Amino acid sequence: MLSKKTKYGLKALTYIARSKDDTPVQVGEIAKYEQIPQKFLESILLTLRKSGFLGSKKGKHGGYYLLKDPKDILMTEVMRVLEGPIAMVPCVSLNYYEQCDDCPDEKTCSVHKLMLQVRDNTLEIFRNTSLADLSVV
Amino acid sequence: MLSKKTKYGLKALTYIARSKDDTPVQVGEIAKYEQIPQKFLESILLTLRKSGFLGSKKGKHGGYYLLKDPKDILMTEVMRVLEGPIAMVPCVSLNYYEQCDDCPDEKTCSVHKLMLQVRDNTLEIFRNTSLADLSVV
DNA sequence: TGTAATTCCTATTAAATTGATAGGAATTAT
DNA sequence: ATAATTCCTATCAATTTAATAGGAATTACA
C-alpha cells in the first residue's frame, strides 16, 4: 500500500504544478483543498524541499514553489524520496540493495525472480512519468 | 515492501512444487531449508490450505501438497491471498475497491492515474506468471 | 493399544512503522 | 510592531507485522 505521506506529497506537488500564479503556494491552501492535515503536510513539504524538489519562502506571503520544470521531475525520484525503495524486496533494489539474511541463493530464489520483473516494470512507468503528466487535468 | 508472510509463502509453495516425491512435504523440512521460523510458516501454510492452494495430511508422515498443477496457480491469486490487494491504493483496486475519504474527484486525481498504470502492469505480470514459472531452477 | 510425529487452532506479545499532533522558533511583508 | 508563514524537534497513538506459546486433534506404526 502507498503511504499517506507519498499520496499527500504527490497531490501537493501536483497542486503546486497546476498553480498558474508565480507566487509561492501556501501549505494551508493545499491542505484545505486536498483535505490533508496541515501539520502533516508541512513536514512532507519540508522533506521535498530538503530533497531539492521545492523551494520555499518564509514569512508572510511565503510558501512553496517548484525548483524545476514539471517535465523534469520524474516519478522515480519523487517516489524514492517519499516512499523509499521502488523494489518490493531489498535484494532487487537498485538504490538500496541488501542481501536477504534468509535466502541461501539469489539465483534460485523464486521470489527474487518475480520481484525483479515487477520492479523493472514499475521502474519503466516511473521513468516515463513526470510531474507534468500528473498535472494534466 | 513485500511482507515476510508473502515472501515465506511464495518460497514454501515453490519448495513444494519442486519436490518430486508424491508424499506430503512437511513444514519442518521447508522451515529448515528456507530458514523460516517454523511456527510462523505453519500459520502461513494453514492460510494457503484454507484458500484452496494446498491440501494437507495430518499426523505422522503428514504434510502439505499442491491441489492444482503449478501451471494453474497464478500469482494474481497467491498474491491476493498472502499480500492483499495488488493495487497500491484502494481506489484503483479491482477486488477491494474503496473510494478515498479525502480525494474530491477521482478523475482529476494525479495519484489515481499513476497508480492505475502501476496496477495494470503488475497485474499483467502476475497474470502471466504461475507457480510453475517460479519453480524453474 | 500406546507413542511419536505431525497438522490445526487460538491467543498473546514484541517490535516496527505510520499517521498525526503539539508547541514554539525564525523569518518576512506590511 | 504585528500577523502570517515556514521551520524544527519532540512526542504520541494507532495499526500492522512478525513471531512465539501451548496445547488439541489426528495419524502411522510398532
Image (cartoon, coloured by chain):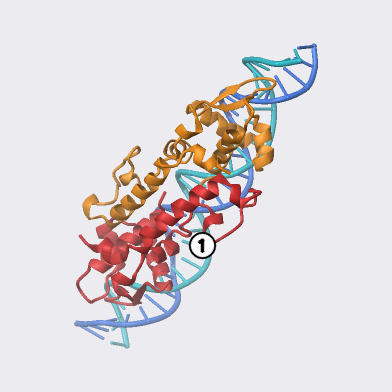
Chain colours: A orange, B red, C cyan, D blue
Above-or-below relation of B61 to A30 = below
Q: Position of residue B114 (x, y in %)?
A: 49, 47
Quarter of the image for the C terminus of chain A: give it. top right
Tell me the residue at 44%/36% (across/down).
A74
Q: Position of residue B107 (x, y in %)?
A: 59, 51
Relative to D10, D28 lies left or right: left
Do we see residue B136 in this rendering?
yes
Above-or-below relation of B99 to A8 = below
Task: From the viewer's side, name the closer residue of B63 and D20.
Answer: B63
Tell me the residue at 27%/66% (across/down).
B132
For label 1, the residue is B94
Tell me the residue at 37%/60% (across/down).
B126
Relative to C26, B38 lies left or right: left
Secondary structure category for the residue under label 1: loop
Q: Position of residue B98 (x, y in %)?
A: 59, 58
Q: Position of residue B43 (x, y in %)?
A: 41, 65
Above-or-below relation of B45 to A118 = below
| Chain of the residue on which disc 1 is drawn | B
